[in-house]
Amino acid sequence: MSVPLAADRAILRCENLVWVVPRDQSGLWTDPVPLALGDPDTLDHRAAVAALDRAGRGYRIAYASGSRSRLLAVVRSGQAVAVLTRSAVPADLRILIAASGLPPLARIGITIWIEERHASPLARAFARHAREILPAL
């Protein structure tokens, strides 16, 4: 069985990735930029590292975890910058603007793909629901 390529899947929603810090923190970061990111194979981690590498900016992984709440705790403490989708930024954090010196991040497309013949009824129902709701968010 072959899995369809991402290009074969309908994009349900596009999201910008953004750099986030505490509301009261300065927006300027010097090298190396301290990062709080997901595990190395996650989208936020790969996008942050790729953007900083392209811009020739130094960085260090201050904290890496699969736990979003732990990552946000590190950011809230002012120890690091994180990467989130724009719609996922909590009210107590703020998005860094371009003047912060950090490079722009990727824009991502959200898709859903399940193998229909092996999917449970619950998985099919979830996929239907997500396909209906995501474009409207």
Image: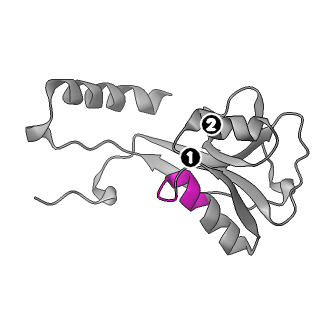
> Within 10 angstroms of label 1, few (less than 14), some, or many (20 or more) residues?
some
Which residues, given as a range, are shown in magenta?
A: 40-47
The Cα atoms of the two marked residues, 1 and 2, are separated by: 7 Å
- The residue sitting at 56% across, 46% down in the picture is 65
In primary-sequence order, the first of circles 1 and 2 is: 1
Asked if the magenta segment contains residue 38, the reply would be no
The reply to whether discs 1 and 2 touch (Cβ–Cβ < 8 Å) is: yes
Give the labeled residue for mark 2. Answer: 70
The rendered magenta stretch, by its main secondary structure, is classed as helix
Identify the coloring: one colour
Q: Secondary structure at mark 1?
A: loop
Residue located beneath label 1 in the image: 65
Residue 135 location, quadrant: top left
Residue 124 sits in which quadrant? top left
Of the residues shown, which amino acid type is indicated by label 1?
Ser
Residue 66 sits above or below residue 100 on the image: above
Disc 2 marks a residue whose amino acid type is Arg
Count of marks placed on residues: 2
Q: Position of residue 48 (x, y in %)?
A: 63, 59
Question: Percent position (x, y) of residue 47?
Answer: 58, 59
Q: Position of residue 119 (x, y in %)?
A: 15, 35
